[in-house]
Image (cartoon, helix red, strand yellow):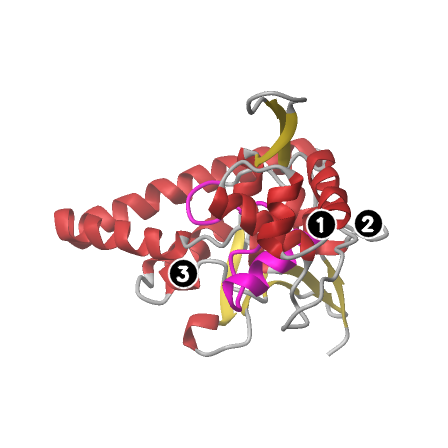
Amino acid sequence: MDHKTAGSSDSPSTPGGPQARRAATWATGPFEQPIGNGHPFEHGTDAQIMERRVRTATPLVTPTPGPGASSTLRREVLYALRTGGPASPDQVADSVGASRTGVLQQLRTLESAGLVTRSLSRHGVGRPRHVYDLTAAAQELFPANYGALAQSILTALRSIGGDTLLREVFEVRREQLKSRIGGRLAERLPAGATLWERVREVASYQDETGYLGRAARDQDGTIRLSEHNCAISGVSSPYPIACEEELALFSEILGANVTRECHIASGGRSCTYRVEPLET
């Protein structure tokens, strides 16, 4: 099927690609807030996830000898400071089994990236020594489990107020998202923007919030909005109302007839919506 696709824009890709764009985006609200340089749909062991985040946040990772090709000195330094607390370069080097020079290089890089802070500490006589510790920003490099938290909160809400309360919560969330996305469309698009332009901007927003959003227009003019990842799959599977509210959100924010053609939660490869103008 011949069609034109669009992500964030038709301009050349931002340096770093979609991952870098998503990493820089602002907080987006319940269930979709990007976590540092990671993704809501990350997979792998804790070490693998953290290594990917470290590579994105602080490039030029230096490999270190030892078992496991994915092991990096920078990740080991971060782990040492997280588990052992503030430490001098010598202490970190002893902890990770690497040279002081190599560890100090990584600490300085992490400090430049705002992930590590340095202070002077006195221990008895002699010159004070530099001690390094993680900053609050470094927390975003470590694995998180917000999906499980969201599920447990929704389960608690259902136990308190049943499906009625749950629906009210999702309706409020839809209104919040509608206000946020609507403000973005008003800011970025000219008055009287076409339906295609609005769909592209919504797809860009969804892309930034982890859904791998894309807009496509067929040769016959048919417009589709697709999400190639469900950033809230841990919620949408047990709570189908999340998908119902998304369909309603797109219909309202675009002012169009929106029909779901494909559904990830039902086994599809994407959530794809056909978008058509309202009949006049």
Magenta extent: 29-55
Quickly name the residue at label 1. 20
**How many labels were placed on the picture?**
3
The secondary element bearing badge 3 is classed as: helix
Residue 15: give its label.
Answer: 2
Marks 1 and 2, how far apart in space? 7 Å
Residue at point 59% right, 67% down? 228
Residue 52 is a magenta residue = yes
- Which tag, 3 or 2, sits closer to the chain's start? 2
What amino acid type is highlighted by mark number 2?
A: Pro
Quickly name the residue at label 3. 243
Q: Is residue 8 left or right of residue 154?
A: right
x and y, in percent, of residue 139 in the image: 52, 42
Q: Is residue 154 left or right of residue 138?
A: left
Residue at point 70% right, 64% down? 216
- Which tag, 1 or 2, sits closer to the chain's start? 2
What amino acid type is highlighted by mark number 1?
A: Ala
Above or below: residue 42 compared with residue 13:
below
Marks 3 and 1, how far apart in space? 27 Å
Residue 142 is a magenta residue = no
Whether pointer 3 and pointer 2 mark residues with C-beta atoms closer than 8 Å, the reply is no
